Image (tube, rainbow, N blue to C red):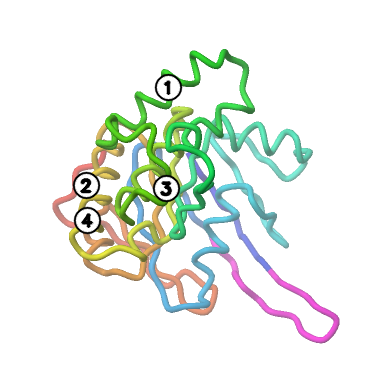
Amino acid sequence: MIRLNNIEKVYRTATIETLALHKIDLTIRKGEFVSIMGPSGCGKSTLLNLMGLLDQPSGGTVEIDGQRVENYRDKDLARLRNEKIGFIFQSFHLINDLPVIDNVEIPLLYRPGTGKGRRELAREALTRVGLGNRVKHFPSQLSGGQKQRVAIARAIVGRPEIILADEPTGNLDSNMGNEIINILQGLNAAGSTIVMVTHDESMARRTGRLIRLYDGAQVADSRVPGFVTA
Protein backbone atom coordinates (compact mmCIF):
# COMPACT_ATOMS: atom_id res chain seq x y z
CA MET A 1 0.00 0.00 0.00
CA ILE A 2 2.93 2.36 0.79
CA ARG A 3 6.47 1.91 -0.48
CA LEU A 4 9.42 4.19 0.25
CA ASN A 5 12.57 3.53 -1.73
CA ASN A 6 15.94 4.95 -0.61
CA ILE A 7 14.29 8.06 0.84
CA GLU A 8 16.39 11.09 1.77
CA LYS A 9 15.04 14.33 3.20
CA VAL A 10 17.26 17.37 3.64
CA TYR A 11 16.17 20.78 4.92
CA ARG A 12 18.36 23.66 3.76
CA THR A 13 18.66 27.28 4.76
CA ALA A 14 21.21 29.89 3.75
CA THR A 15 23.51 28.83 6.59
CA ILE A 16 22.72 25.24 7.53
CA GLU A 17 21.77 21.88 6.06
CA THR A 18 19.84 19.37 8.17
CA LEU A 19 19.52 15.71 7.21
CA ALA A 20 16.07 14.67 8.45
CA LEU A 21 15.85 11.20 6.85
CA HIS A 22 18.59 8.99 5.45
CA LYS A 23 18.26 5.93 3.19
CA ILE A 24 14.79 4.85 4.31
CA ASP A 25 13.53 1.69 2.60
CA LEU A 26 10.10 0.77 3.93
CA THR A 27 7.05 -1.13 2.71
CA ILE A 28 3.66 -0.95 4.44
CA ARG A 29 1.39 -3.73 3.25
CA LYS A 30 -2.37 -3.48 2.86
CA GLY A 31 -4.18 -4.06 6.15
CA GLU A 32 -1.16 -3.49 8.42
CA PHE A 33 -1.26 -1.44 11.62
CA VAL A 34 2.24 0.01 11.99
CA SER A 35 3.67 2.27 14.69
CA ILE A 36 6.74 4.47 14.33
CA MET A 37 8.79 5.38 17.41
CA GLY A 38 11.96 7.29 18.19
CA PRO A 39 13.26 10.30 20.13
CA SER A 40 12.07 13.83 19.37
CA GLY A 41 13.63 15.19 16.18
CA CYS A 42 14.48 11.78 14.72
CA GLY A 43 12.28 12.24 11.63
CA LYS A 44 9.03 10.48 12.59
CA SER A 45 6.64 13.25 11.53
CA THR A 46 8.73 13.98 8.45
CA LEU A 47 8.38 10.34 7.43
CA LEU A 48 4.62 10.46 7.98
CA ASN A 49 4.34 13.66 5.90
CA LEU A 50 6.13 11.96 3.02
CA MET A 51 3.78 8.98 3.22
CA GLY A 52 0.85 11.39 3.22
CA LEU A 53 2.15 13.35 0.20
CA LEU A 54 2.26 16.53 2.29
CA ASP A 55 5.97 16.88 1.53
CA GLN A 56 8.37 15.61 -1.11
CA PRO A 57 11.63 13.73 -0.52
CA SER A 58 14.99 15.18 -1.48
CA GLY A 59 15.87 11.81 -2.97
CA GLY A 60 14.28 8.42 -3.51
CA THR A 61 10.73 7.51 -4.52
CA VAL A 62 7.32 7.23 -2.87
CA GLU A 63 4.63 4.83 -4.09
CA ILE A 64 1.01 4.85 -2.91
CA ASP A 65 -0.99 1.78 -3.87
CA GLY A 66 1.46 1.05 -6.68
CA GLN A 67 1.56 4.62 -8.02
CA ARG A 68 4.90 6.44 -8.08
CA VAL A 69 4.19 10.10 -7.37
CA GLU A 70 7.43 12.00 -8.03
CA ASN A 71 6.10 13.44 -11.30
CA TYR A 72 2.60 14.21 -10.06
CA ARG A 73 1.37 17.80 -10.22
CA ASP A 74 0.05 19.43 -7.06
CA LYS A 75 -3.57 18.90 -8.07
CA ASP A 76 -2.90 15.21 -8.77
CA LEU A 77 -1.27 14.80 -5.34
CA ALA A 78 -4.24 16.56 -3.74
CA ARG A 79 -6.67 14.22 -5.49
CA LEU A 80 -4.71 11.13 -4.44
CA ARG A 81 -4.54 12.36 -0.83
CA ASN A 82 -8.27 13.03 -0.79
CA GLU A 83 -9.16 9.63 -2.24
CA LYS A 84 -6.66 7.37 -0.51
CA ILE A 85 -5.50 8.94 2.77
CA GLY A 86 -7.09 10.09 6.02
CA PHE A 87 -5.09 12.18 8.50
CA ILE A 88 -5.32 12.29 12.31
CA PHE A 89 -3.26 14.92 14.13
CA GLN A 90 -2.28 15.35 17.78
CA SER A 91 -3.85 18.82 17.96
CA PHE A 92 -7.20 17.79 16.38
CA HIS A 93 -7.29 20.78 13.96
CA LEU A 94 -11.04 21.26 14.30
CA ILE A 95 -12.73 24.52 13.27
CA ASN A 96 -14.26 25.92 16.45
CA ASP A 97 -16.95 27.95 14.64
CA LEU A 98 -18.38 24.87 12.91
CA PRO A 99 -20.51 22.16 14.51
CA VAL A 100 -19.06 18.69 14.69
CA ILE A 101 -20.88 17.35 11.63
CA ASP A 102 -19.61 20.23 9.46
CA ASN A 103 -16.05 19.57 10.62
CA VAL A 104 -16.38 15.94 9.58
CA GLU A 105 -17.81 16.83 6.16
CA ILE A 106 -14.80 18.96 5.14
CA PRO A 107 -12.87 16.28 3.14
CA LEU A 108 -16.02 15.53 1.15
CA LEU A 109 -16.31 19.12 -0.11
CA TYR A 110 -13.54 18.32 -2.60
CA ARG A 111 -15.43 15.38 -4.10
CA PRO A 112 -18.50 15.13 -6.32
CA GLY A 113 -21.71 14.61 -4.38
CA THR A 114 -24.73 16.25 -2.83
CA GLY A 115 -25.04 18.04 0.48
CA LYS A 116 -27.47 15.37 1.65
CA GLY A 117 -25.01 12.63 0.73
CA ARG A 118 -22.19 14.37 2.59
CA ARG A 119 -24.41 14.74 5.64
CA GLU A 120 -25.27 11.05 5.65
CA LEU A 121 -21.63 10.01 5.36
CA ALA A 122 -20.63 12.40 8.16
CA ARG A 123 -23.36 11.05 10.46
CA GLU A 124 -22.27 7.51 9.66
CA ALA A 125 -18.62 8.32 10.49
CA LEU A 126 -19.57 10.02 13.78
CA THR A 127 -21.74 7.07 14.76
CA ARG A 128 -18.84 4.75 14.01
CA VAL A 129 -16.66 6.54 16.59
CA GLY A 130 -19.45 6.73 19.16
CA LEU A 131 -20.50 10.35 18.66
CA GLY A 132 -23.75 9.95 16.77
CA ASN A 133 -25.51 11.98 19.46
CA ARG A 134 -23.08 14.91 19.25
CA VAL A 135 -23.47 16.00 15.64
CA LYS A 136 -24.75 19.49 16.51
CA HIS A 137 -22.20 20.19 19.25
CA PHE A 138 -19.28 22.56 18.71
CA PRO A 139 -15.68 21.54 19.46
CA SER A 140 -15.60 23.80 22.54
CA GLN A 141 -18.37 21.64 24.04
CA LEU A 142 -16.35 18.43 23.77
CA SER A 143 -13.65 16.77 25.87
CA GLY A 144 -10.20 16.10 24.45
CA GLY A 145 -11.04 12.47 23.76
CA GLN A 146 -14.27 13.46 22.01
CA LYS A 147 -12.40 15.99 19.87
CA GLN A 148 -9.98 13.29 18.79
CA ARG A 149 -12.88 11.00 17.92
CA VAL A 150 -14.30 13.80 15.75
CA ALA A 151 -10.88 14.05 14.08
CA ILE A 152 -10.96 10.30 13.44
CA ALA A 153 -14.47 10.58 11.97
CA ARG A 154 -13.19 13.33 9.65
CA ALA A 155 -10.28 11.09 8.63
CA ILE A 156 -12.52 8.13 7.76
CA VAL A 157 -15.54 9.94 6.30
CA GLY A 158 -14.24 9.53 2.75
CA ARG A 159 -13.52 5.85 3.36
CA PRO A 160 -9.77 6.09 2.67
CA GLU A 161 -7.68 2.96 2.45
CA ILE A 162 -4.83 4.52 4.46
CA ILE A 163 -5.01 6.32 7.82
CA LEU A 164 -1.95 8.28 9.01
CA ALA A 165 -2.01 9.25 12.69
CA ASP A 166 0.58 11.63 14.20
CA GLU A 167 0.60 11.22 18.00
CA PRO A 168 -3.19 10.67 18.15
CA THR A 169 -3.06 9.97 21.92
CA GLY A 170 -0.38 12.52 22.79
CA ASN A 171 -2.76 15.11 24.29
CA LEU A 172 -4.97 12.60 26.09
CA ASP A 173 -4.91 10.81 29.44
CA SER A 174 -4.41 7.05 29.50
CA ASN A 175 -8.13 6.19 29.55
CA MET A 176 -8.91 8.43 26.57
CA GLY A 177 -5.78 7.19 24.82
CA ASN A 178 -6.92 3.61 25.19
CA GLU A 179 -10.32 4.54 23.71
CA ILE A 180 -8.62 6.03 20.66
CA ILE A 181 -6.39 2.98 20.17
CA ASN A 182 -9.46 0.74 20.46
CA ILE A 183 -11.13 2.72 17.67
CA LEU A 184 -8.00 2.50 15.49
CA GLN A 185 -7.77 -1.24 16.09
CA GLY A 186 -11.40 -1.58 15.03
CA LEU A 187 -10.73 0.39 11.84
CA ASN A 188 -7.74 -1.81 11.12
CA ALA A 189 -9.79 -4.95 11.70
CA ALA A 190 -12.28 -3.59 9.14
CA GLY A 191 -9.50 -3.31 6.55
CA SER A 192 -7.85 0.10 6.96
CA THR A 193 -4.07 0.34 6.65
CA ILE A 194 -2.85 2.48 9.57
CA VAL A 195 0.52 4.09 10.29
CA MET A 196 0.81 5.79 13.68
CA VAL A 197 3.61 7.93 15.11
CA THR A 198 3.79 7.67 18.90
CA HIS A 199 6.08 8.27 21.86
CA ASP A 200 4.12 5.79 23.98
CA GLU A 201 5.60 2.29 24.04
CA SER A 202 2.41 0.78 25.47
CA MET A 203 0.37 2.19 22.57
CA ALA A 204 2.93 0.99 20.03
CA ARG A 205 2.70 -2.50 21.50
CA ARG A 206 -0.99 -2.57 20.55
CA THR A 207 -0.13 -2.31 16.85
CA GLY A 208 1.06 -5.10 14.59
CA ARG A 209 4.50 -3.82 13.68
CA LEU A 210 6.95 -1.44 15.32
CA ILE A 211 9.48 0.65 13.39
CA ARG A 212 12.13 2.63 15.24
CA LEU A 213 14.01 5.66 13.95
CA TYR A 214 17.14 7.30 15.30
CA ASP A 215 18.78 10.39 13.82
CA GLY A 216 16.78 10.04 10.62
CA ALA A 217 17.68 6.40 10.01
CA GLN A 218 15.60 3.27 10.47
CA VAL A 219 17.24 1.18 13.19
CA ALA A 220 14.62 -1.52 13.86
CA ASP A 221 11.57 -3.14 12.28
CA SER A 222 9.81 -5.85 14.28
CA ARG A 223 6.50 -7.64 14.53
CA VAL A 224 4.50 -7.27 17.73
CA PRO A 225 3.74 -10.75 19.14
CA GLY A 226 0.08 -11.69 19.35
CA PHE A 227 -1.31 -8.98 17.07
CA VAL A 228 -3.64 -10.12 14.31
CA THR A 229 -3.85 -7.70 11.35
CA ALA A 230 -6.85 -7.28 9.08
Task: Answer above or below: position of 137 versus 168.
Answer: above
State the residue position of label 4.
206
State the residue position of label 2.
182
Residue 204 horizontal/vertical position (percent): 28, 61
Alpha carbon of mark 4 to alpha carbon of mark 3: how far?
28 Å
Task: Answer above or below: position of 214 versus 100.
Answer: below
Indicate which disc, 1 or 4, sits on the residue closer to the N terminus: 1
Q: Report the side of 204 relative to 50 (left or right).
A: left
Q: Three-letter amino acid code at disc 1?
A: Leu
Residue 42 horizontal/vertical position (percent): 51, 75
Alpha carbon of mark 3 to alpha carbon of mark 1: how far?
19 Å
**Which residue is at the front of the view, 96 or 31?**
96
Residue 56 horizontal/vertical position (percent): 69, 55
Q: Three-letter amino acid code at disc 2?
A: Asn
State the residue position of label 1.
121
Indicate which disc, 1 or 2, sits on the residue closer to the N terminus: 1
State the residue position of label 3.
139
Q: Report the side of 190 relative to 162 (left or right).
A: left
Residue that appears at 61% across and 73% down:
20
Mark whose residue sits in front, 3 or 1: 3
Q: Three-letter amino acid code at disc 4?
A: Arg
The quarter of the picture where residue 18 lies is bottom right
SS assignment for the magenta stretch, majority: strand
Residue 142 horizontal/vertical position (percent): 34, 49
